[in-house]
Image (cartoon, grey):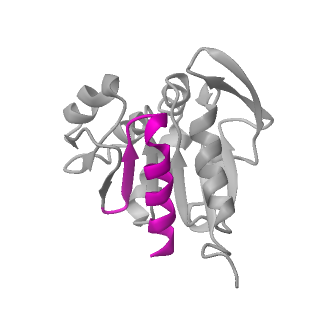
Amino acid sequence: MSAPLTGRRVAILAADGVERVEFEQPRDALAANGARTDLLSLRPGTIAARDHDLDPAGELPVDLVVGRAAVDDYDALVLPGGTVNPDKLRIDADAVDFVRAFVRSGKPVAAICHGPWTLVEAGVVDGRTVTSYPSIRTDLANAGATVVDREVAVDGNLITSRDPDDLPAFCAALVDALRA
């Protein structure tokens, strides 16, 4: 019997400063269910991961530059956090355009911790119910979102979570969305 997500391909969009656990746990949960993941970033090579935002946590190899990626090639998108990572993504036109197009495609988009910052920049949270790390909730609300404080919020194709403690629920919601 094949894994439930065999044949599914998921983009994980991240830049320097990505919170390593928020990259690894969704990637591993997807792989355990048979999905293939690609790390998309702003430039080729590697990106610097972090633990708790400040501690170096190694390098992650980039599979594809986001400006060369096509939404049609993927079944879902993951936006991990870390404060520096989404701050870099939200000032890159290719990254913002990719996120906007992905949300508009109706395919699952899962963002955790500070990851929803890029959703704000893409202009896709107005009227949506989301959650995030506490320090960016005002930004989400100012962008028109209804912000809730729970481990996972699912609103249509958007899946959001607050922080690394929510990763089990976040990963389960992502896998469930891809199974649908």
Residue range (magenta)? 156-180
Q: Is residue 64 visible?
A: yes
- The image position of residue 39, as x and y in percent, is 68, 47
Residue furthest bottom in the image: 1
Assign the N terminus to one quadrant of the image.
Answer: bottom right
State how many labels appear.
Answer: 0
At 66% across and 46% down in the image, what residue appears?
Answer: 40
Whole-percent x and y of residue 79? 51, 44
Residue 65 lies, with reference to residue 52, above or below; the image says below
Residue 173, image x and y in percent? 43, 59
Depth check, front residue: 134 or 71: 134
| Farthest residue, direction top | 54
Q: Main secondary structure of the magenta part?
A: helix
Compared across the picture, whether 173 is left or right of 68 comes to left
Quadrant of the image occupied by residue 20: top right
Quarter of the picture holding the C terminus: bottom left
Q: Is residue 14 visible to us here?
A: no
Which is nearer the eye, 152 or 157? 152
Indicate the quadrant where residue 17 lies. top right
Q: Residue 138 at what x, y percent from top left?
A: 24, 27
Residue 7 lies in the magenta stretch: no
Occupied quadrant, residue 65:
top right
Query: Residue, x 38% and y 53% (percent of image)?
Result: 159
Magenta stretch encompasses residue 176: yes
Q: Nearer the viewer, residue 60 or 42?
A: 60
Task: Report the residue at 62% width, 23% height from top.
Answer: 51
Residue at image location 81% in from the left, 35% down from the top: 45
